[in-house]
Amino acid sequence: MKTIKILEIPFTFFDHKKEFEEKIISFLKEEKLHSIFTPNAEIISIAERNNNLKKILMNSDLNLPDGIGVIFLAKKLGYKNLKKLAGIDAMKYMLSLAVKEDISVYFLGAKEEILRDMIKKIEENYKGLSIAGYHHGYFLKDYEEKIIEDINMSAAKVLFVALGAPKQEFWIEKNKDKLKVRIAMGVGGSFDVLSERKKRAPKIFINLGLEWLYRIFQDPIRLIKRVPNLFYFLYIYIRG
Ligand code: UDP
């Protein structure tokens, strides 16, 4: 395990799944909320222009290197052989760990029908998982307190927040003193993938670090929205 700062944001790289699991268990033992984020090239490029987001990432309990962009920046700083850990993979590891250790989880985010599909798939794929509760991610501000109450009443230990970045980062930061969970993790579009409505890239893309390319072409409207951030990331990379 190695933690390095990239553009002032600490990233932790794990050598093995076991190491990651140990970190999660240590978080669960401590009586406080631990925030976990998975910044990728796009989030880094937004954080470079949004100081509030940057501060949240600088002060979180764990940032995982979600994607090849982070690995490229680390290489430029002289760190070789570091492994990425995609948010979706980290979430899957945590779900397996939750089954093994009997840890209850709550899911917040995504569209209602996607969330329902995901719950079904998760019940099939993670038999015995203790699902404390769930709520879709399209709620009005006035309803937020009710959701927080529901999460706290459920006594969930882990909260997965899939509101998209950077919305989920701001949401967790804003509510961290009210939430009684031990871990709150921003997981972006992971619920869509776990619902199996959206396909993940084929293994070859993932292994070549080209998952982002696959995702962009899967949804061309997203491509247009993302171009400025990707160019900004390129600028960050060249600028050093
Ligand atoms: N999402 C949500 N509430 C919102 C905005 C987004 O629940 O107000 C969900 C969306 O349905 C999707 C996830 O957040 O499941 C990720 O959204 P997006 O693809 O925009 O973000 P990214 O994958 O880039 O983090």
Image: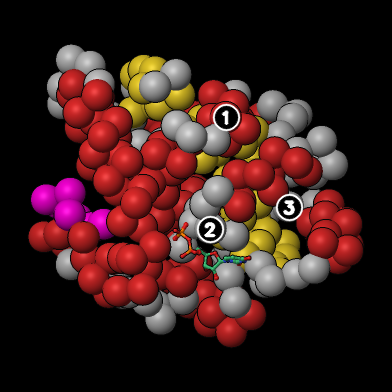
Question: Seen in the image, is 180 located left or right of residue 28?
Answer: right
Q: In the rendering, which numbered label is found on residue 156?
A: 3
| Residue found at x 60% / y 77% | 111
Q: Quadrant of residue 73?
A: top left
Residue 240 higher or lower than 52, as above or below: above
Q: Quadrant of the N terminus?
A: top left
The answer to the question of whether label 2 and label 3 lie on touching residues, with beta carbons closer than 8 A, is: no
Disc with the residue nearer the chain's start (1 vs 2): 1
Residue labelled with disc 2: 164
| Residue range highlighted in magenta | 206-212
Disc with the residue nearer the chain's start (3 vs 1): 1
User: Badge 1: few (under 14), some or many (20 or more) residues near its Cα, within 10 Å?
Assistant: few
**Kind of residue sitting beneath label 1:** Asn
Residue labelled with disc 1: 51
**Kind of residue sitting beneath label 2:** Gly
Instruction: Give the spatial CA distance, label 1 vs label 2.
Output: 18 Å
Q: Is residue 79 magenta?
A: no
Residue 138 higher or lower than 99, as above or below: below
Instruction: Give the spatial CA distance, label 3 vs label 1.
Output: 31 Å
The answer to the question of whether label 3 and label 1 lie on touching residues, with beta carbons closer than 8 A, is: no
Residue 51 higher or lower than 232, as above or below: above
Instruction: Give the spatial CA distance, label 2 vs label 3.
Output: 21 Å
**Kind of residue sitting beneath label 3:** Ala
